[in-house]
C-alpha cells in the first residue's frame, strides 16, 4: 500500500493543502521553484515547478525532445465554504453558516467528523501573505432523529441554508475566531477562504484490506499519482504535471483548467529554451492525459453501468469515452494510450456511460480550449464519487502510477493527421 497516497489524502484537506503538500514532495525530489513574475532560466535535464494562487501548480522535467507529455488533474473536491461572520446562534447552539461548494452527496456529510480548513490572508506591514490553515477541532452536522421525521428513510430533501450547518459549539461562541487569532499571532488577519471539510481518516477495508476509503479520493488520487509518476520518470520529451483548482465548480478561474495557466507555462518553457519558433510544431507532437476518476460498477446497483462495458475496481486504469465529447477520448487518442499501457504491461478497461443517463465532464475538454492537442481521459475506478468518503482499490493506484510513468517516458510523434508513432 502506498503511504504517499494515504498521507496525501489525509493531509490535503483543501486544494491549498494539496498544493502545499505537492510542493513539499517536489522540493524533496530536487525540483526548482519558478515564479510567474520572474524570468524562467531553464537548464537541459532540469526539474521545475510553478504555482498559481497557492492552489494550482505545474511541474515539469526537461527531456531532449521538444514536445510535451502532459497529465492534467485537479485538487478540489465538493465541500462547504464558510461565509463571513459564520457563527449563528440557535437556542444555546452556535453553528456555522456555510454554502455548498461543488456537487456533493450531501446526505453523506451528516454525523461525520468535520473540520475547518483553507487559507488565511494576513498582513505584515505592507505585505499580504497567504497562510494554509487547519482547525484543530472537530465538528458535526447532526441528523434529525427518526422520531421527528418518520419518512426519512424514504428520502429527504435538504435545505442548503438550514439543514447543512455544522455545530460550532454550545454555550459559547467565538471559538473559531480565537483559534484563528492564535494561529496568526502578531500578523493582522485581513480575509480568508475557509471550508468545512470531511475529517475522516483514510482506512482500509475488506478481508484482504485491498480497498481504501477516504475523503477526496476524487481527485487527489489522480493528482498524487501524476506527481509520483513525474518523480519516477526519465522522459525523452518534456513531461508536465498540471494540478488545477476549481474543477468542481466549472474551472473558469485564473487557476482552473479553463484559464491560460497551462498554455502560458508551456509557451514560457519554449521561450526559455530558445525554441518558441517551433512551439506550434511541438504542440502537434504533444499529448495530454486528463486524469480524473471514473465510476466503478456498483455492487448494489449494477444496472447503472453500461450493459457491455462494466468497469471493475481492481482491473486497472479506466479509459473514458463519450459520444458528445464530455471526455476528450477518441479512437486515435485511446489507441495511443493503450499502446503505451500494453508496452508497460499496465491493465486498463473502457468506460461508457449508460445511454439513458447524463454524463459528467472533466477538465480535459475544458483545457483543450486553451491547449488544443490530442488528449485522452482516464481515471481510477471508484465508488461513491462526491460522497464525504469514497472507495477505491489500492492496486489500481499502483497501476495508475505505472501507466503514467510509462506515458511520461514515451515519445509521441505525429506524421500529419492520420499517422502517429509511439516510442
Image (cartoon, rainbow, N blue to C red):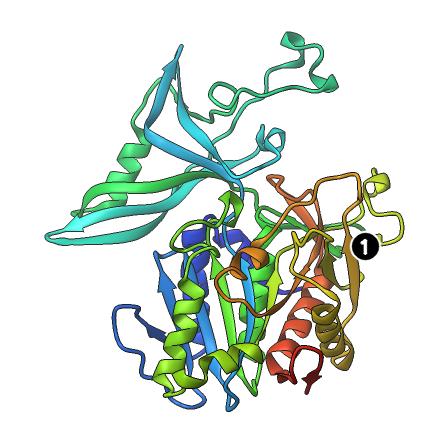
In percent of width and height, residue 44 lies at 42, 90
Residue 87 seen: yes
Residue located at (36% from left, 57% from top):
54
**Quadrant the N terminus occupies:** bottom right
Residue located at (59% from left, 52% from top):
362
**Which quadrant of the figure has residue 400?**
bottom right
Residue located at (63% from left, 8% from top):
148
**Which quadrant of the figure has residue 272?**
bottom left
Q: Judge from the rendering whether residue 124 lies leftward or rightward of residue 56; answer left or right.
A: left
- The residue that disc 1 covers is 312
In percent of width and height, residue 200 lies at 56, 42
Asked if residue 382 is positioned above or below residue 164 in the image, the reply reads below
333, 225: nearer the viewer = 333
In percent of width and height, residue 36 lies at 30, 68
Residue located at (71% from left, 60% from top):
394
Asked if residue 76 is positioned above or below residue 56 in the image, the reply reads above
146, 193: nearer the viewer = 193
Amino acid at each position: 500500500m502506498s503511504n504517499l497516497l494515504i498521507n496525501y489524502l489525509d493531509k490535503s484537506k483543501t486544494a491549498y493543502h494539496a498544493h502545499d503538500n505537492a510542493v513539499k514532495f517536489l522540493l524533496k525530489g530536487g525540483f526548482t521553484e519558478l515564479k510567474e513574475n520572474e524570468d524562467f532560466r531553464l537548464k537541459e535535464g532540469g526539474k521545475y515547478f510553478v504555482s498559481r494562487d497557492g492552489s494550482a501548480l505545474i511541474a515539469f522535467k526537461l527531456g531532449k525532445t521538444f514536445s510535451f507529455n502532459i497529465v492534467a488533474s485537479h485538487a478540489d473536491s465538493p465541500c462547504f465554504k464558510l461565509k463571513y461572520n459564520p457563527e449563528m446562534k440557535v437556542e444555546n447552539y452556535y453553528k456555522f453558516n456555510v454554502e455548498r461548494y461543488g456537487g456533493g452527496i450531501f446526505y453523506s456529510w451528516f454525523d461525520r467528523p468535520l473540520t475547518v480548513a483553507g487559507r488565511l490572508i494576513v498582513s505584515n506591514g505592507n505585505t499580504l501573505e497567504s497562510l494554509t490553515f487547519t482547525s484543530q477541532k472537530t465538528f458535526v452536522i447532526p441528523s434529525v432523529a427518526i422520531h421527528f421525521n418518520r419518512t426519512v428513510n424514504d428520502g429527504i430533501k435538504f435545505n442548503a441554508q438550514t439543514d447543512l450547518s455544522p455545530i460550532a459549539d454550545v454555550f459559547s461562541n467565538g471559538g473559531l475566531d480565537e483559534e484563528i487569532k492564535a494561529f496568526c499571532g502578531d500578523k493582522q488577519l485581513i480575509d480568508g477562504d475557509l471550508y468545512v471539510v470531511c475529517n475522516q481518516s483514510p482506512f482500509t477495508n475488506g478481508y484482504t484490506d485491498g480497498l481504501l476509503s477516504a475523503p477526496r479520493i476524487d481527485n487527489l488520487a489522480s493528482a498524487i499519482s501524476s506527481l509520483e509518476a513525474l518523480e519516477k520518470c526519465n522522459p525523452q520529451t518534456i513531461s508536465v504535471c498540471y494540478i488545477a483548482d476549481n474543477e468542481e465548480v466549472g474551472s473558469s478561474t485564473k487557476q482552473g483548467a479553463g484559464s491560460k495557466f497551462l498554455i502560458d507555462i508551456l509557451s514560457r518553457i519554449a521561450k526559455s529554451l530558445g525554441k518558441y519558433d517551433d512551439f506550434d510544431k511541438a504542440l502537434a507532437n504533444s499529448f495530454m492525459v486528463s486524469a480524473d476518476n471514473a465510476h466503478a460498477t456498483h455492487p448494489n446497483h449494477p444496472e447503472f453501468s453500461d450493459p457491455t462495458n462494466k468497469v471493475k475496481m481492481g482491473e486497472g486504469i479506466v479509459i473514458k469515452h463519450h459520444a458528445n465529447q464530455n471526455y476528450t477520448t477518441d479512437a486515435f487518442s485511446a489507441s495511443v494510450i493503450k499502446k503505451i499501457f500494453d508496452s508497460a504491461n499496465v491493465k486498463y478497461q473502457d468506460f461508457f456511460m449508460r445511454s439513458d443517463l447524463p454524463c459528467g465532464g472533466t477538465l480535459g475538454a475544458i483545457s483543450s480550449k486553451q491547449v488544443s492537442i490530442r488528449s485522452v481521459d482516464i481515471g481510477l475506478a471508484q465508488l461513491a464519487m462526491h460522497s464525504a468518503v469514497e472507495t477505491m482499490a489500492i492496486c489500481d493506484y499502483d497501476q495508475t502510477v505505472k501507466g503514467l510513468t510509462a506515458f511520461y517516458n514515451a515519445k509521441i510523434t505525429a506524421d500529419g493527421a492520420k499517422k502517429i508513432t509511439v516510442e
